[in-house]
Amino acid sequence: MKIMAQVGMVMALDKCIGCHTCSVTCKQVWTNRPGAEYIWFNDVETKPGIGYPKRWEDQVNNKGGWKLNKNQKLKLASGGRFSKLLRIFSNPNLPIIDDYYEPWTYDYETLTTAPVSKNGPVATAHSALTGKELDLQWGPNWEDDLAGAPTRALNDPNMAGLEEKVKMSYEQAFMFYLPRICEHCMNPSCVASCPSGAMYKREEDGIVLVDQQQCRGWRFCVSGCPYKKVYFNHKTSKAEKCTFCYPRVEGGQPTICSETCVGRIRFLGIVLYDVDKINEAASTKDPTKLLDAQLDLFCDPFDPKVIKQAEADNIPQDWIQAAQKSPVYALAKRYRVALPLHPEFRTLPMVWYVPPLSPVLEVIEPEKDGSTDPDNVFHAIDKLRIPIHYLANLLSAGDDEVIKNVLKRLGALRSFERKRQLSGTIDDSLGAQVGLGSADLDDLYQLLAIAPYDRRYVLPIAHRERGDELLLSQGTCGIDFESISVSKDNPQKLESVPIEFRRRK
Ligand code: SF4
Ligand code: SF4
């Protein structure tokens, strides 16, 4: 057993109001520069929808992430070394610019310099790539609030098996927002896909970064990432991606998207995990069991054995304490209300989501006397406006029961609090029905509904002074699948190398 620390994020989808503040502040800080016009490290998609880039979730065509070969061994879905060698100058699995969108700006000068005339001047859109006038047909947020849903939403890969059930007419539509950043995966296929060894996972906190000096622009990371969260900067010819705002995180501050989140939907914290078991967990045969396999990697930060091992593995004391207070650990493992996005991609993602409990009051059956019992939430779970199976396709590899269990816990929490606040009654039976005590429900309420800043963001400060110690003790990681790399001696040749964690520069 070797314990390492990994930062993670949880987003509570019920609280996202789709304001895009997170996207805009992230863009201002990280990608407001030439070559990155089309790049949104953080984007907020309306679901159902095909997203940004178009149909990023379709791994049949995109071939991102991992799959098991016939010997049940983990392999990159895009193929091994030989097939990469054949495609090194022509990669068919890359999204094209139209899948993202052709970035544009407006001809503002026309507005400010137009002479007085009968009709007002119009600022036309111009491509930020070619300067030519653009007939806008698609953008990063084209599907906002279900725009175009009747024609496009049925192409959403998560609609598989629901096409007949869900009619995209206005009255029957459902929607919610899905903010997305890089998942800073525990088993990152982008790192394993990079032929130059430029992508790496930091050993002290698991943040996945691109070394701009080492990147040779092969773009296998772009196709290898199933979440399509690595981008190619066409001005620098280098790959770029979300940095989890590492300069802020090192100082104990939240990422910009979290700091500025209007809905306060984001939670940040670290988890301690057993790095020696990554490969085994990601190789779990049944995709619906990947969630449990990933949760089994997370170590209980209160367990004396775990603490002893963490100390032996050079995890600083304040990091162990931060893991004990981590809202990510609490929501994902202790209360099991947060779920990973598309666990079936086998990258063991570390941005988790509390699924939305769509409005329940309207689906609760009227009682015989015509009144409704708002606490009767368990019966309502199957009739919610957002189909359970849609959420299951998104967050539990298609397993409806996982989603139902989470929604029941959220429903119990809602009823418990409602009763307590309206009548002062503590109803222990509600928690008992979902395997939680009343103290747990209260803690969950404090965390999900009204948590102050320092409970939502629990990030220990980086120990720069311990860098050498960390490197000596932790060295390369326990991830033992192969990556590929261009041979230093012969640039025409690809050779296999183990994936490495690296120390912060
Ligand atoms: S989500 Fe991030 S860490 Fe995971 S594979 Fe994609 S780029 Fe890599
Ligand atoms: S800032 Fe927060 S509430 Fe607004 S869109 Fe982003 S995640 Fe949602």
Image (cartoon, rainbow, N blue to C red):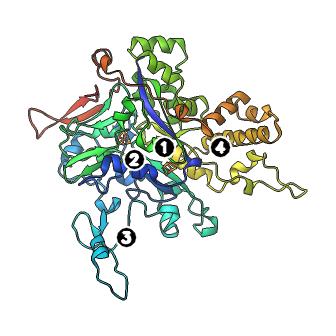
Q: Which one is in front, 32 or 132?
A: 32
Q: Amino acid at mark 1?
A: Leu
- The residue most toward the right is 369
Return the mark for residue 341.
1
- The residues bearing labels 4 and 3 have C-alpha atoms spaced at a distance of 37 Å
Q: Are marks 2 and 3 in contact (CB under 8 Å)?
A: no
Return the mark for residue 41.
none
Residue 214 at what x, y percent from top left?
18, 37
Q: Which one is in front, 310 or 111?
A: 111
Q: Which residue is mark 3?
A: 137
Q: Amino acid at mark 4?
A: Leu
Asked if the residue at label 2 sits under 8 Å from ligand 1, the reply is yes
Q: Are marks 3 and 1 in contact (CB under 8 Å)?
A: no
Secondary structure at numbered mark 4: helix
Task: Of the two numbered discs 2 and 4 on the same chain, state the one appearing first in sequence.
Answer: 2
Could you tell me which residue is drawn at 37 percent across and 89 percent down? 118
Q: Answer left or right for 170 relative to 48.
A: right
Q: Amino acid at mark 2?
A: Tyr
Q: Which residue is mark 4?
A: 407
**Quadrant of res 76:** top left
- The residues bearing labels 2 and 3 have C-alpha atoms spaced at a distance of 23 Å
Task: Of the two numbered discs 1 and 2 on the same chain, state the one appearing first in sequence.
Answer: 2
